[in-house]
Image: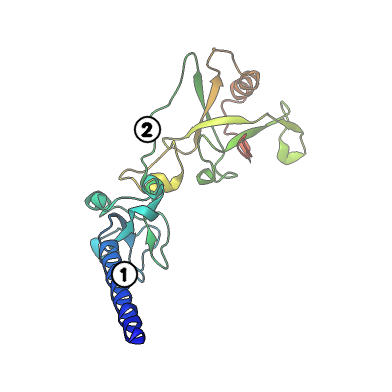
Amino acid sequence: MKGIQGLIIAVVLGLIGFAFNMVYLNSSKDFGHESFIGVRRGADVNSGTALSKNHLEEIQIPREFMGNLQEYALPWDDLDAIVGRPSIRNYDIGGLLLRNDFRTARNELQLLGKETAVSVPIDTRTTIPSQIIPGDTRVSFYLPSRGKDPAQGGRGNWTKPFDVLSVGLRMGSTEVINGQRGRSSRENMLTLMATNEDGKTNPEMTILLNHLADNNFKPLRLKLHAPHSR
């Protein structure tokens, strides 16, 4: 008799455990999600491809596992704003669309206090302007000795690095510009920081402007430097 009672108790406890498991599983299906824009696997999206709704899909992430993803990924609610815009990179295996992929480049100089800027011509035959990222890449210029052509063995000096504010009309990377409706131009001109916030002139700028004036503003040869933080 005791054996039968024990068996019944075991069965009841098993049923109770099963019921609790079912309740947990059913309730876990109801936790909240956030939706983001993703590129479908196999959508064949390359850099420059105009994004269509057929390329994109909704990706749902449970809120409890989302962390700070919403700070970086584009929400599904922004779908209509993204459709028609060109991709700035390849999505060979799909993936989330990131906010930085579609950020808007600045379209005006951000000068503070007594800061000033000067534009100088650059030699695009010896420079690849797309490699210069305003606010990131720094540049220095080769100033040949007066009256001597470096191609004929004349010696000169490189200036100290300058901070670049714009390349022509571009104030960001070429990827950002390509993600916009408009296109940049006049990339044979660099705009450089000439004075600091207190209005103090960069001595290197004075040397550079004197050189340009003495040489009829002939385009400058330059070399690239990493940002200060590297």
Judged from the image, the secondary structure of the residue bearing numbered disc 2 is loop
Between 90 and 40, the residue placed more toward the observer is 40
The label number, if any, that marks residue 21 in the structure image: 1
Question: In the displayed image of the protein, which residue is found farthest to the left?
Answer: 80
Kind of residue at badge 2: Asn
The quadrant of the rendering that contains the N terminus is bottom left
**Location of residue 93 in the rendering, given as x and y in whole percent from the top left corner:** 41, 68
**Location of residue 124 in the rendering, given as x and y in whole percent from the top left corner:** 54, 42
- Tell me which label, 2 or 1, sits earlier in the chain: 1
Separation of disc 2 and disc 1 at Cα? 58 Å
Question: In the displayed image of the protein, which residue is found farthest to the front?
Answer: 1
Kind of residue at badge 1: Asn
Q: How many marks?
A: 2
Q: Residue at the spot x=32%, y=43% of the render?
A: 182
Which residue was labeled with disc 2?
107
Q: Residue at the spot x=53%, y=27% of the render?
A: 192
**Location of residue 165 in the rendering, given as x and y in whole percent from the top left corner:** 49, 30
* Residue 47 in the figure: left or right of residue 224: left
Report which quarter residue 169 is drawn in: top left
Q: Residue at the spot x=33%, y=50% of the render?
A: 74
Between 95 and 149, the residue placed more toward the observer is 95
Q: Residue at the spot x=30%, y=65% of the render?
A: 24
Judged from the image, the secondary structure of the residue bearing numbered disc 1 is helix
**Residue 219, placed above or below residue 37:** above
**Residue 77, placed above or below residue 153:** below
Would you call the spot at circle 1 few (<14 residues within 10 Å), some (14-19), or many (20 or more)?
few
Would you call the spot at circle 2 few (<14 residues within 10 Å), some (14-19), or many (20 or more)?
few
**Location of residue 223 in the rendering, given as x and y in whole percent from the top left corner:** 64, 39
